[in-house]
Each structure stands twice: as C-alpha cells, then as structure tokens.
Amino acid sequence: MDVRYEIENLIRAQLSGVGRTGPNDLSARCPFHRKSDGSQERSPSFAMALDTGLYFCHSCGAKGNLYTFFRDLGMERQEIELNYKNLIDAAKGNLPAAKDPIRAEIFDKNPLDHRLLGLLDYEPNDLRQAGFTSETLKHFEVGFDQWHFRTTYPIRDLGGSLVAISGRSVNGAVPRYKVYNKEYMTWGLPPRDEWQRGNVLYNGHRLYSLYQSRDPVDIIVVEGFKACMWVHQAGLTNVGALLGHYMTEPQRWILEDLTGGGGGTVYMFLDNNWPGWHGCEVAGKTLAKSVKVRVMMYPPRLRDDDKAQPDSCTPEEIWYAKETAIDFYSFRAMRS
C-alpha cells in the first residue's frame, strides 16, 4: 500500500484548497472551524503529514491522527473500521521509531481492538449533569459500561492505539476507578495483563500531531480524565493528564518532545491539595532542567479548598490561571 498516495487522494476528496507544502506535507482549508460569520476560511491553515496522517490546524488548534481525523469529520466508528483500518494501521507504522529503551515502551506492542468501544457507546449521565457537553464526551470517546456500571475512559498510547480502558463506578463499587483486566471476559475476550500507566500521557495521541506545527508548543498538565476534558472544553486544547499525582520518566520524555525539546512551556495545573502541589514540585524540578515550566494557581475562592480540581474552576478562571501562571522557581520559593 502506498500510504502517501492513499492519504493524499482522501484529503483531496474531503477538503478544499489542498496543496503541497513539501514532499511529505499537504495544506488545506481546515474542516473543523469557520470564521465568525459562518463562512469557511480562505487561507489553508490545516496541515497533514502524508506518511503518518498526523494533522494540525494553525488557526483553531485541531490536531490528531488519521483515525481522529475521520472521527472528527463525523464518521461512525464502524464506517472507519470497515473502510480505513488498513490505511490507519499502515500510517501508524510510519511513526518515528523509538530512540531509546524508555521511548520504546511508549508505543504499546499489544493494543486492544478499538471496535470494543462500540459496546460502550453510551453517553454517561453523570458527566452530562456535571457540565460536560456531548461534543466533549464524544471527542474523548467517553462511554458507559452497562455490564459493570462504570463510566469508561479509553486510554490511547502516543501513536493512537487503544491500550486500556478505565472505568469509574457509578454505584459505589470499590475501587472507584479501575483499569479493566478481567472485565474483558464479559465479552468473550481474554483478560489483560497488568498495564503500565506511566507509559501514557492521557490525550497525548492528539498532542503528538503538534510535531506538524514545527513551532514551540505549550502544554497544560493535569492529573485526571475529568480535569483534562474540562480544560479542553474551556478552549485550552493542548492538555494532557498524568493519570496520577506524579510524573513518570516516560511522561517526562513525552512532554520534552512535545514541547519541541524546550521551545514550548509546560503549565502545571495539578489538584489543589498536598499530593498535587508535591507532584507539581517534583515534576517541575525535573522538567525545568530542559523545558520552561510555569504553575497555574487556583482562584482565590478555591485557594483553601483541598478538594478543588481544575474542573472546580469556571472556563474564565482556567484562562486567567494560564495567563497569570507563575514561574516554577517562584512557585518553589513561595512553597518553601
């Protein structure tokens, strides 16, 4: 299969204003945003790499891989699987090879079949009631498991492969959050081996396409699923979650690479409690050796609330926290 040829034909059929910007890159008018008057942009702000299918819009910030491109165009999962699975897999095979043993673990070698998500394709009422829009839930592929009564969060590796599913109980079951293992047997699938959480930056597969911009990139780092989705819904889409209080070594590699080796800034926005502040201090101390690090502070009304998380803030408060974020070393001095 000639991946470049296939992708170019698809993009020319789907988008307008398509042109070559190099031997391996296409530009086009972005299909994911319009001008304030509802008309389509005239300038080609959308860019895609022909070998990997990674894309990025310089105007609206839309980003992702070939699978998310089709999904965000409105195609159903079944249609994507039926028509484009081979092309998506071939494009993933062209992603840059790992440069060392740490990065080699970032790309999962035994992914789940993402058709499994079709069984969980229900909108969770608890998150809708919490203020998350249907668009946000669909963007993050959040679903509901009617067999185990859990809201489900699919987890993808940096290349976009489905590597795990985390379920949050809605009926008081313990543990509240759990990464599925034996649950797969419900659907006639074998149980999964223990999964290495630290190899993944949640939402990192979309951030990975930022390599296309070739410009310094800023990334907001939060702890969990809901925080990541809430910050994204507020309009700050360059956000990734550690899935815990503390940054792992693979996550450090990912953040350093995604920020262009130090050209961008990492904004720490962990939970407003001792583990969150300590995790921020430990991660910031490591990252600051090679990346600019700033810390987003909670608004005054939440400063004394040790249960506050990013999703406790309004969208306006999140934007203000980013605009007024303090330098990491100032944060350390304030904490000492």
Image: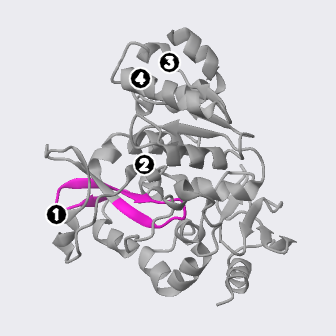
Mark 1 lies on a secondary structure that is loop
In this rendering, position of residue 277 left or right of residue 58: left
- Residue 1, by quadrant, is bottom right
In this rendering, position of residue 202 left or right of residue 113: right
Mark 3 lies on a secondary structure that is loop
Instruction: Name which residue lies at 46% across and 53% down.
Output: 200
In this picture, is 318 found above or below 30?
Answer: above
Instruction: Name which residue lies at 65% across and 49% down.
Output: 257
Discs 4/2, front: 2
What label does residue 147 carry, if any?
A: 1
The residues tagged by marks 4 and 2 sit, at their Cα atoms, a distance apart of 22 Å
The residues tagged by marks 1 and 4 sit, at their Cα atoms, a distance apart of 34 Å
What label does residue 198 carry, if any?
A: 2
Q: Residues within 10 Å of mark 3 (few under 14, many from 20)?
A: some
Discs 1/2, front: 2
Q: Residues within 10 Å of mark 4 (few under 14, many from 20)?
A: many
Mark 1 or mark 4, which has the lower sequence index? 1
